[in-house]
Amino acid sequence: QVQLLESGGGLVQAGGSLRLSCAASGSIFSINAMGWYRQFPGKPRELVATISSGGNTNYADSVKGRFTISRDNAKNTVDLQMNSLKPEDTAVYYCNLHAIAGTPALPRSYWGQGTQVTVSS
């Protein structure tokens, strides 16, 4: 089993910053891509940012220049630094990782429980 523990969500004023963190634990053999997604009410989950095992990053156009994703391969963690937050960034944010894990060890996708980010105007 793999567990993802998210932290760092909350309420912030527009223009402020938040840092989301996600720590993976359990029967992990290796982790490939890690990322953050978000979901607005009544909408499907959408990509915010991803980072490969080699450090290559990909961002949604709406967050480029404001959000930065990073990972620590030794600790199996992925962070999302969110600056210049806007009210339209208000959503539930989910951590995701693609890993070879479990018994038997197979490639799977895992999701965190979600953390609320609310940006007030």
Image (cartoon, rainbow, N blue to C red):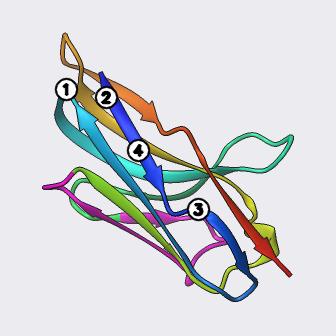
Residue at left offset 21%, top offset 59%: 54
Q: Nearer the viewer, residue 48 or 27?
A: 27
Of the residues shown, which amino acid type is indicated by label 3? Gly
* Stretch in magenta: 57-75
Q: Which residue is mark 3?
A: 9
Question: Is 53 displayed left or right of 9 in the figure?
Answer: left
* Callout 3: SS: loop
Vertical side of 47 occupied by 10: above or below: below
Q: CA distance from mark 2 to mark 1?
A: 6 Å
Q: Which residue is mark 2?
A: 2
Residue 81: percent from left, percent from top: 47, 74
Residue 53: percent from left, percent from top: 23, 53
Q: Earlier in the sequence, mark 1 or mark 4?
A: 4
How crowded pointer 4 is (Cα within 10 Å; few <14, some 14-19, many 20+) is rated as some
Q: CA distance from mark 1 to mark 4?
A: 15 Å
Quadrant of the image containing the N terminus: top left
Q: Earlier in the sequence, mark 2 or mark 3?
A: 2
* Callout 4: SS: strand
Q: Which mark is residue 27?
A: 1
Q: Nearer the viewer, residue 107 or 110?
A: 110
Quadrant of the image containing the C terminus: bottom right
How crowded pointer 2 is (Cα within 10 Å; few <14, some 14-19, many 20+) is rated as some
